[in-house]
């Protein structure tokens, strides 16, 4: 993972391949096979252990993704916040707690799928692969957080610029080449998850039903008007 | 007035023989696919009994339907924000154990078993895991078990009975049960639609059929928890929810739904009701004891010129208005007031109505003479083996007088016909009963006709569904040449 060409491949090429596959894959899948977009819930078949894994996983991963996003969008403000040690400790401890929660959740859901035969019957190869990748991702992240402090700060100074350079199509991998191996692994595995995303159950995250918060309770569809579009919610399809 | 039309239904419980033909017809057409084996869009329950899923009427546990909170109407299972916070794990979702684990048998063993001392058996195999299972419950485990301590005595409706009434109900010589066939009620204020975070469920504007858009459903399964009748089901294989579609492809081609068509007892009636959609919310907030009248007031008179004009203005087709005028459901529900909605206190406004069953006649035998006339002509309704309080809990939103009215009228019609054809009751007595039951002899004759002598065409007055006006019909068929058709072009397989 250290030769210059390897670095270039993994940190400058892979991201674009992953992002390209992500966008093309999710859009094509939504258009060609909308039926396959589902949470693929297994609560119906196994409801004893379900709560613990599923809630821990989601609340944990939401907080962590939010943190990654904030470091990416407002790195200055994060650094400013961290300029006082106490605030730094608070942020670090909360981040670590949510990361552990996510890890426990991921391990919990996969253990549940191994343990209960009914949950196993609705588990596909893609599930095993992507959930293993997520476990590795969370574990690597936690390792970095513990052994390379203070991640919330140096993310803003070195990881964020790298990601900026990728999204602005001026890839600059100088920030990464000197990083420890485990950090590199976290980055590469992250891009692999992004690329694999369209072929897994993870697509359910893209159809999160937020519009429910503002839509009317009852929906009616009429022959001549047809199916109401997703956006805008109160389109001509709804005549109430 | 915002007039809409609704394909509505009446089930005449006095005629149901509990043969389950309806359930089989439905299963063979719609739910014999993987993941749907456990679903019974149509099922027949024995009452008193626990039903399917077990004790579905216990809303303290299942949290189905609406409730009034601070003057507002809210789903019992969720509000808007809790729906999203609990989306990862729905605290109110029933699981396979509340229904049953579907199974088949290892028939091969009957042919392939090696020679031995015992006859080979076909062991049950789970249709979920494919492994051998011990069958402990099935969809009709309580069939005909009136009086049984495991089933009948755990019926949630028994709460409405006094301890004496309960004891009477289960006394050996009085034991009684009746059948309660159920499908989706295609409600006016469906809890399932209101619960769906994705907006995948909807009511069809033209006929009121409630459907789940399979392409929009994301398997959040909120509808399963929200429907108080437990008539949406989660397909564990495809990860989508499914429900009774009232055989709309059959209706659109002028045929009765399969369960209606196959009904041996001819208990099922289908026809259009016109209703005022503008008042649903207002009526849904009425107190419990005004709900039945409230729902009746939503249903409009299809002969009233004002209603006809408003219906036309709201876009209801003339042919549908005409169909509403011939609707047997209108007669049973609004004119005769014989048919009542199940558990209206859930406030979804079911559009499937039930004619309450008469109990078996209780005659006291006196020296070989059967005595059925006492001073009070309707005494056996008050003392009927199925207590009126029980039927009122099931069909009257707790209002005994509504059930009593329907039972008295049915009895009066019977005696009137008996005076005419058998002659062991005098016409005087029959006329007096009719008068007391708020029924004219013309009305009695009409009830008799539609109850006993009804033909296929009398029972099913299917409106023209005007599918030709659907959006798909505006598309150029040539564009779809060599395709698999409109709509789905791929098989509905589970996602990756
Ligand atoms: C954006 C909003 C999201 C919503 C509304 C959501 C909702 C759900 C639901 C309802 C399930 C099915 C639970 C069940 O079995 O009953 C599920 C499963 C799952 N979700 Fe999410 N999710 C979201 C985002 C995410 C994200 C961002 C990830 C990870 C990167 C994720 C990873 C998973 C995984 C791995 C499972 C399967 C767990 C198992 O093995 O059962 N979800 N999600
Ligand atoms: S009975 Fe049918 S329409 Fe009514 S809430 Fe249940 S699924 Fe929805």
Image (tube, grey):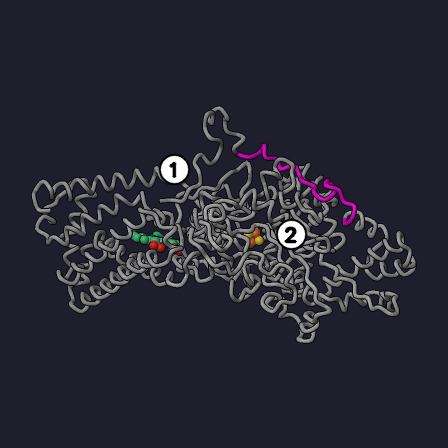
Q: Residues within 10 Å of mark 1 (few under 14, many from 20)?
A: few
Q: Give the numbered dot on residue B352.
A: 2
Residue B391 rendering spot, x and y as whole percentages? 68, 63
Q: Do discs 1 and 2 belong to a common subunit? A: no
Subunit bearing disc 1? A
Nearest to the observer: residue B437 or residue B44: B44
Q: Secondary structure at mark 2?
A: strand
**Is residue A101 rendered to the left or right of residue B257?**
left
Q: Which residues are magenta?
A: B451-471
Residue B312 rendering spot, x and y as whole percentages? 66, 40
The image shows residue B295, relative to residue B465, as above or below, that is below
What residue is disc 1 on? A31
**Is residue B34 rendered to the left or right of residue A152?**
right
Q: Residues within 10 Å of mark 2 (few under 14, many from 20)?
A: many
Residue B168 rendering spot, x and y as whole percentages? 70, 72
Q: Secondary structure at mark 1?
A: helix
- Is the C-beta separation of discs 1 and 2 under 8 Å? no
Magenta residue check for B469: yes
Residue A217 in view (yes/no): no
Q: Ligand 2: does it lie within 8 Å of the C-beta at label 2? A: no
Identify the residue at horizontal 79%, vertical 65% (top origin): B362
Nearest to the observer: residue B408 or residue B19: B19
Magenta residue check for B269: no
Residue A106 in view (yes/no): yes
Query: Total number of numbered labels?
Result: 2
Residue B180 rendering spot, x and y as whole percentages? 65, 57
The image quarter in which residue A143 lies: bottom left
**Is residue B14 rendered to the left or right of residue B466?**
right
Subunit bearing disc 2? B
Nearest to the observer: residue B34 or residue B468: B34
Q: Which residue, as the protein is rendered here, is positioned at the far bottom? A: B163
Identify the residue at horizontal 62%, vertical 57% (top origin): B45
């Amino acid at each position: 993972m250290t030769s210059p060409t390897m670095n270039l491949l993994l940190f400058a090429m892979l991201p674009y391949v992953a992002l390209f596959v992500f966008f093309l894959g999710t859009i094509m899948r939504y258009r060609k096979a909308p039926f396959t977009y589902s949470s693929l819930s297994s609560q119906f078949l196994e409801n004893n252990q379900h709560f613990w894994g599923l809630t821990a996983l989601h609340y944990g991963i939401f907080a962590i993704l939010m943190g990654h996003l904030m470091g990416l969008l407002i790195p200055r403000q994060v650094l400013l916040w961290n300029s006082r040690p106490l605030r730094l400790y608070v942020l670090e401890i909360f981040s670590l707690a949510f990361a552990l929660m996510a890890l426990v959740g991921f391990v919990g859901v996969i253990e549940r799928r191994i343990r209960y035969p009914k949950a196993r019957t609705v588990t596909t190869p893609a599930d095993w692969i992507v959930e293993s990748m997520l476990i590795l991702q969370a574990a690597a992240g936690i390792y970095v957080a513990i052994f390379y402090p203070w991640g919330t700060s140096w993310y803003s100074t070195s990881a964020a610029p790298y990601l900026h350079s990728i999204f602005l199509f001026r890839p600059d991998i100088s920030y990464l080449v000197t990083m420890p191996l485990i950090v590199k692994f976290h980055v590469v595995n992250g891009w692999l998850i992004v690329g694999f995303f369209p072929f897994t159950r993870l697509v359910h995250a893209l159809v999160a039903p937020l519009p429910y918060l503002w839509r009317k309770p009852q929906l009616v569809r009429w022959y001549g008007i047809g199916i109401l579009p997703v956006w805008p919610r109160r389109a001509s399809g709804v005549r109430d | 007035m915002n007039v809409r039309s609704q394909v509505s239904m009446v089930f005449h419980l006095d005629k149901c023989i509990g043969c389950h033909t309806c359930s089989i017809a439905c299963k063979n057409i719609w739910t014999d696919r993987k993941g749907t084996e456990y679903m019974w869009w149509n099922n027949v329950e024995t009452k008193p009994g626990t039903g399917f899923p077990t004790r579905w009427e216990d809303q303290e546990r299942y949290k189905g339907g609406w409730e009034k909170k601070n003057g507002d109407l809210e789903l019992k299972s969720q509000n808007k924000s809790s729906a999203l916070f609990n989306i990862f794990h729905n605290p109110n979702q029933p699981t396979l154990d509340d229904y049953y684990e579907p199974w088949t048998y290892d028939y091969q063993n009957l042919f392939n078993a090696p020679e031995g001392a015992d006859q080979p058996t076909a062991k049950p195999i789970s249709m979920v895991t494919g492994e051998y299972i011990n069958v402990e419950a099935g969809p009709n485990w309580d069939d005909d078990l009136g009086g049984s301590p495991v089933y009948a005595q755990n019926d949630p409706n028994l709460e409405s009975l006094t301890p004496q009434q309960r004891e009477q109900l289960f006394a050996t010589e009085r034991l009684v049960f009746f059948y309660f066939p159920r499908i989706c009620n295609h409600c006016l204020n469906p809890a399932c639609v209101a619960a769906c975070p994705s907006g995948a469920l909807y009511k069809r504007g033209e006929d009121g059929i409630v459907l789940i858009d399979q392409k929009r459903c994301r398997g959040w399964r909120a509808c399963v928890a929200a429907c108080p009748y437990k008539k949406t089901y989660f397909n564990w294989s495809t990860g989508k929810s499914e429900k009774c579609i009232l055989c709309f492809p059959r209706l659109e081609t002028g045929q009765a739904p399969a369960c209606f068509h196959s009904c041996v007892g001819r208990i099922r009636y289908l026809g259009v009701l016109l209703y005022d959609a503008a008042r649903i919310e207002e009526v849904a907030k009425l107190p419990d004891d005004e709900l039945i009248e409230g729902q009746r007031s939503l249903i409009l008179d299809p002969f009233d010129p004002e209603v006809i004009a408003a219906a036309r203005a709201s876009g209801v087709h003339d042919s549908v208005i005409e169909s509403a005028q011939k609707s047997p459901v209108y007669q049973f529900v609004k004119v005769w007031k014989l048919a009542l909605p199940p558990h209206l206190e859930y406030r979804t406004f079911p559009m499937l109505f039930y004619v309450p069953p008469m109990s078996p006649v209780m005659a006291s035998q006196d020296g070989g003479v059967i005595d059925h006339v006492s001073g009070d002509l309707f005494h056996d309704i008050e003392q009927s083996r199925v207590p009126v309080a029980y039927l009122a809990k099931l069909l009257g939103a707790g209002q005994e007088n509504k059930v009593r009215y329907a039972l008295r009228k049915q009895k009066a019609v019977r005696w009137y016909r008996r005076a005419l054809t058998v002659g062991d009751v005098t016409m005087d007595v029959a006329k007096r009963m009719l008068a007391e039951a708020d029924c004219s002899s013309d009305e009695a004759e009409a009830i008799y006709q539609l109850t006993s002598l009804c033909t296929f065409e009398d029972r099913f007055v299917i409106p023209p569904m005007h599918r030709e006006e659907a959006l798909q019909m505006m598309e150029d068929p040539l564009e779809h040449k060599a395709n698999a058709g409109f709509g789905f072009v791929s098989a509905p397989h589970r996602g990756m």
